[in-house]
């Protein structure tokens, strides 16, 4: 996965978020059955989406040649996602191979478990590229897209989904429209369309969001709209903290910093592959304390194994690139990683409550 390797901030951020992703997937409880899992799922998916958008510089991205764009994303994420999707479906949903139509529907319209994020992100990238020129030139165009993104979130991620025809909800993943708003918010902050707020303003929002999210979990009086409000406030505050957190993490953290950078740099592969492990080694119903301890142990094991594999394979990849590009000389100080790097996300729980 592409990343600004010269700047450890984004990689460390992605590494930290991946820790939460993997840890959340080790719980046997459903999201609504564990306070810890409920709180984690209340912010880290929007943070991943925001960070993906925040890595896009529209000045360059909006005029990038289509061929170059498609080649870049095919190499960086689509090819790996396609291979992992086939493996996952073969193991967990073999009926998806009953016909080409069934396979394409499951692959693209109703992706299984964690496989929704890559096509969702790629569609968002295509939309941003298609609208790049008017978005860069026209504040009304940016406002219109923002209104459309908020409308999508309201219609597909709140009780207002009752207004959406059931045939749409049954056949298209609601996150395609419902989560675009978080990517767009990241793009807006990165490119100055939305102000970058001070932590002094954001910290109270995060605190209110944490209290509200916890109250929704513990209160019988909290209805679905209160849940939407709490999720939105917490996710908004946490996401708007990311630019400041990125700046704070420009210096590697002691002890764990290099490991987090490795996990973040390869976050796409860690994200795509870790459910094969967490699904096979799911912590049993042994009580919440033991479940958390076992979950933490599994999480650490996956992270350590990922770093070891990366340490073995990175030199191989470096030698291959040197052999392929030995005739190309980069100018002094050149930065090879593009600004429009993307990041891997959180996987949504299965219908059964994972």
Image (cartoon, helix red, strand yellow):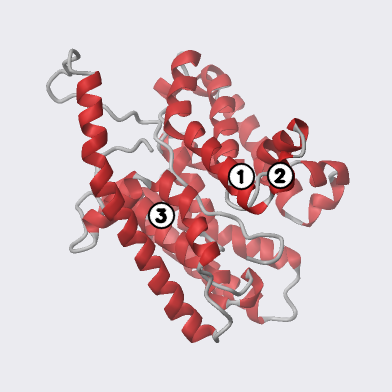
**Residue 180 relative to residue 283: left or right:** right
Q: Earlier in the sequence, mark 2 or mark 1?
A: 1
Residue 193 % position (x, y): 48, 34
Q: Is residue 245 visible?
A: no
The image shows residue 50, relative to residue 144, as above or below, that is below
Q: Which mark is residue 29?
A: none
How would you rate the neighbour count of disc 3 (Cα within 10 Å): few for under 14, some for 14-19, many for 20 or more? many
Secondary element at tag 3? loop
Cα distance, mark 2 to mark 3? 28 Å
Query: Mark on residue 173?
Result: 2
Closer to us: mark 2 or mark 3?
Answer: 2
Q: Does label 1 or label 3 sit earlier along the sequence?
A: 1
Contact, mark 2 vs mark 1 (Cβ under 8 Å): yes
Residue 110 in percent (x, y) is at 71, 43
Q: Tell us which disc is closer to us: 1 or 3.
A: 1
Q: Secondary structure at mark 1?
A: loop
Q: Position of residue 347 (x, y in %)?
A: 56, 54
Q: Which mark is residue 241?
A: 3
In the rendered image, which residue does mark 1 sit on?
A: 116
The mark nearer the N terminus, 2 or 3, is 2
* Quarter of the rendering containing residue 104: top right
**Side (left or right) of 96 relative to 9:** right
Q: Residue at x 36, y 35 (%)?
A: 2
From the top left corner, tell me how far across and down residue 38 is, in percent. 58, 70
Q: Quadrant of residue 231?
A: bottom right
How far is disc 1 from disc 3 in space, using C-alphas?
Answer: 25 Å
Tell me the quarter of the image containing the N terminus: top left
Q: Is residue 142 left or right of residue 257?
A: right
């Amino acid at each position: 996965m592409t990343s600004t390797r010269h700047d450890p901030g984004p990689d460390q951020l992605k590494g930290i978020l991946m820790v939460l992703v993997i840890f959340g997937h080790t719980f046997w409880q459903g999201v609504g059955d564990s306070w810890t899992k409920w709180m984690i799922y209340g912010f880290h998916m929007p943070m991943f989406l925001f960070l993906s958008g925040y890595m896009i510089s529209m000045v360059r991205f909006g005029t990038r040649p289509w061929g170059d764009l498609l080649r870049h994303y095919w190499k960086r994420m689509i090819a790996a996602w396609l291979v992992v999707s086939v493996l996952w479906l073969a193991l967990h949903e073999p009926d998806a191979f009953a016909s080409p139509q069934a396979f394409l529907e499951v692959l693209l319209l109703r992706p299984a478990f964690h496989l929704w994020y890559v096509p969702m992100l790629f569609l968002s990238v295509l939309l941003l590229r298609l609208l790049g020129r008017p978005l860069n030139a026209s504040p009304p165009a940016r406002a219109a897209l923002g209104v459309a993104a908020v409308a999508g979130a309201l219609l597909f991620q709140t009780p207002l989904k009752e207004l959406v025809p059931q045939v749409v909800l049954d056949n298209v993943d609601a996150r395609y429209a419902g989560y675009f708003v978080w990517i767009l918010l990241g793009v807006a902050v990165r490119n100055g369309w939305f102000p970058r707020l001070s932590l002094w303003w954001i910290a109270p929002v995060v605190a209110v969001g944490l209290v509200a999210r916890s109250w929704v979990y513990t209160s019988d009086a909290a209805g679905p709209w209160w849940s939407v409000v709490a999720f939105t406030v917490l996710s908004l505050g946490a996401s708007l903290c990311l630019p400041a957190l990125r700046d704070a993490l420009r210096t590697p953290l002691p002890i764990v910093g290099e490991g987090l950078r490795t996990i973040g740099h390869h976050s796409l592969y860690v994200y795509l592959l870790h459910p094969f492990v967490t699904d096979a080694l799911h912590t049993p119903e042994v009580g919440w304390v033991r479940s958390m301890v076992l979950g933490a142990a599994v999480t650490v094991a996956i992270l350590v194994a990922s770093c070891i594999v990366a340490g073995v394979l990175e030199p191989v990849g470096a030698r291959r690139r040197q052999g392929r590009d030995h005739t190309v000389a980069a100018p002094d100080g050149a930065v090879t990683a593009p600004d429009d790097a993307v990041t891997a996300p959180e996987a949504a729980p299965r219908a059964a409550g994972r």
